[in-house]
Structure formats: C-alpha cells, structure tokens
C-alpha cells in the first residue's frame, strides 16, 4: 500500500497539473479572445475605410456635378448677356436708321415748305427744272381766296403773285 505521504504527493502533483492545465486553458482563452478582438478591430477598420472611400467618391461626384452645373449656368448667363448686347445693338442701329430717315424727311418737308412760301410770295425759282424737288412735276397752281385783308399773299390783292 501506498503511504499516506505518497498519496498526498500524488494529489499535490495532480492538483498542480490541474492548476497548470487551468492556467493553460485560461491563457489559451485569453489569446483566443485577443485574436478575435484583433479580427473584429481589423474588420471594423476595413469597413470604416471602405465607407470613407465611398463617401469621398460620392463627394467627389457631387462636387463635379455642382461644378458642371455652375459652369453651365455661367455659360448660359454669358450667352444671355451676349444676346442682350446684340439685341441692344440692333435696336440702336434700327433707331439710328429711323432717326436718320425722320431727319431727312423733316429736312425735305421744311425745304418744301420754304420753297412753297418763297413761291407764294414771289421769291421762288423761275425755272423749276433746275430744282430737284420739282423735276418732272407739273407747275403748282395758286388759288386766290379773299379773306378781306388787302395786300397779303393769298388774298388776290398781292401784286407779287399776279401773272397779268
């Protein structure tokens, strides 16, 4: 039989072995937990990096679209301004032409009126063929009206207008 001391020695060794095994298991569990934590950390980091890259890509696309829209708006505004300038210039040219025509017409009307007055009071040209306004037209006829005033043109009493 074994002695009590040996039994205690075996028990002590068994307990020591159990303690050692327990420590090894705890160590293994601790290392496994660290490994899993590291894997989770890496996976989270990768996911975060992918999200960051996707966000940057999306933001880049948004910036590009905004820049394109701004450029398009600037171009359209420039085209509208150019069209406005062209319209304004055409309006100025048209107005200038109308004013020039109106000026010429008014000058001709005034000249005609002056010539008519001169002719009426006997200061008109004797030879209307030299006058460009009267070329090819029949000579003007005058009609006398008696308004009761003597000696005034158009009354019939004015001597400068008589062909007798």
Image (cartoon, rainbow, N blue to C red):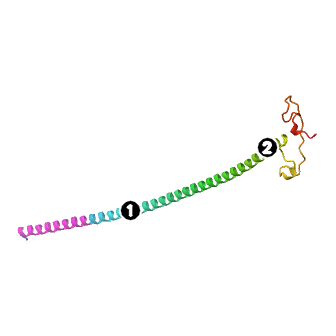
> Residue, x 38% and y 63% (percent of image)?
49
Residue at which label 2 appears? 114
Residue 72, position as x, y percentages in the image: 55, 58
Report the label total: 2
Front one among 50 and 160: 160
Residue at which label 1 appears? 47
> Residue, x 64% and y 52% (percent of image)?
88
The relative height of residue 76 versus residue 4 in the rendered view (above or below) is: above
Quadrant in which residue 14 is drawn: bottom left
The quarter in which the C terminus is drawn is top right
Residue 87, position as x, y percentages in the image: 65, 53
Looking at the rendering, the stretch of residues picked out in magenta corresponds to: 4-31
Quadrant in which residue 141 is drawn: top right
Q: Residues within 10 Å of mark 2 (few under 14, many from 20)?
A: few
Residue 151, position as x, y percentages in the image: 85, 33
The relative height of residue 119 versus residue 7 in the rendered view (above or below) is: above
Which type of secondary structure does the marked residue at label 1 adopt? helix
Quadrant in which residue 152 is drawn: top right
Q: Main secondary structure of the magenta part?
A: helix
> Residue, x 32% and y 63% (percent of image)?
41
Front one among 3 and 79: 79
């Amino acid at each position: 039989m074994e002695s009590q001391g040996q039994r205690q020695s075996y028990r002590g060794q068994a307990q020591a072995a159990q303690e050692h095994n327990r420590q090894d298991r705890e160590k293994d569990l601790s290392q496994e937990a660290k490994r899993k934590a590291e894997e989770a950390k890496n996976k989270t980091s990768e996911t975060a990096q992918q999200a960051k890259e996707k966000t940057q890509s999306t933001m880049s696309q948004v910036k590009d679209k905004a820049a394109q829209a701004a450029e398009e708006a600037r171009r359209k505004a420039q085209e509208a301004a150019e069209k406005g300038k062209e319209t304004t210039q055409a309006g100025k040219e048209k107005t200038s032409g109308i004013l020039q025509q109106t000026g010429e017409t008014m000058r001709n009307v005034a000249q005609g009126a002056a010539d008519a007055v001169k002719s009426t009071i006997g200061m008109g040209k004797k030879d209307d063929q030299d006058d460009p306004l009267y070329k090819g037209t029949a000579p003007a006829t005058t009609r006398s009206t008696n308004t009761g005033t003597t000696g005034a043109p158009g009354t019939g009493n004015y001597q400068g207008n008589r062909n007798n």
